[in-house]
Image: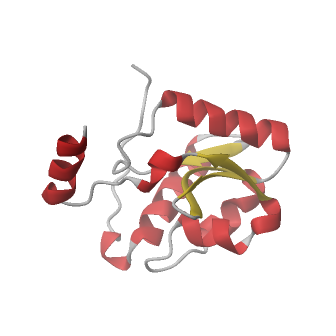
Amino acid sequence: GLPYDLVLNERWHEGIASSVRAGVQHLIARTEKLKAIVILACDQPFVDAHTVRQLIDLHQESGKPIAACGYGGTVGIPAVFACSRFHALLELEGDHGAKALIIAQPDDLATLDFPDGAIDIDTPADYQRLIAAN
């Protein structure tokens, strides 16, 4: 598989924004000349490599600093953020994750239609419903 780093967020109790900040800070410190990052969550079971590739392609082709997925009448992660948005990601606080930045900057956004992005698994009951439906 591909190499990866595990980033421990010791400030998890501060909300989802602290996890975004921890990841972005780690990548900035680790990688010179970072052009963009992909943010995604592990609770969206239908996100796959193809979806991520489509987002990256959309980001590059559109020239927009943010490429995000559209689902369920909204936009959100998975998403690609250009380096020009890293500072804004580092300023997120509390339970305002990357979606807050995506929604706040609609003119800077390219959207990938991804209806299955609305499906997320937060509880054992969510998982059982997913299994039963498939």
> Is residue 31 positioned above or below 13 on the image?
above
Q: Where is residue 83 in the image (x, y as percent from the top left)?
A: 73, 52
Q: Position of residue 51 (x, y in %)?
A: 55, 35
Determine the residue positioned at 83% across, 43% down: 62
Left or right: where does residue 43 sit relative to residue 57? Answer: left
Along the line of sight, the residue nearer the viewer: 70 or 59: 70
Determine the residue positioned at 39% across, 19% down: 1
Total number of numbered discs in the rendering: 0
Residue at the farthest front position: 133
Left or right: where does residue 94 sit relative to residue 10? Answer: right
Residue at the farthest right position: 63
Left or right: where does residue 35 sit relative to residue 27? Answer: right
Q: Position of residue 115 (x, y in %)?
A: 51, 48
The quarter of the displayed image where residue 46 is located: top left
What scheme was used to colour the molecule? secondary structure
Determine the residue positioned at 15% across, 58% down: 125
Along the line of sight, the residue nearer the viewer: 15 or 87: 15
The quarter of the displayed image where residue 31 is located: top right
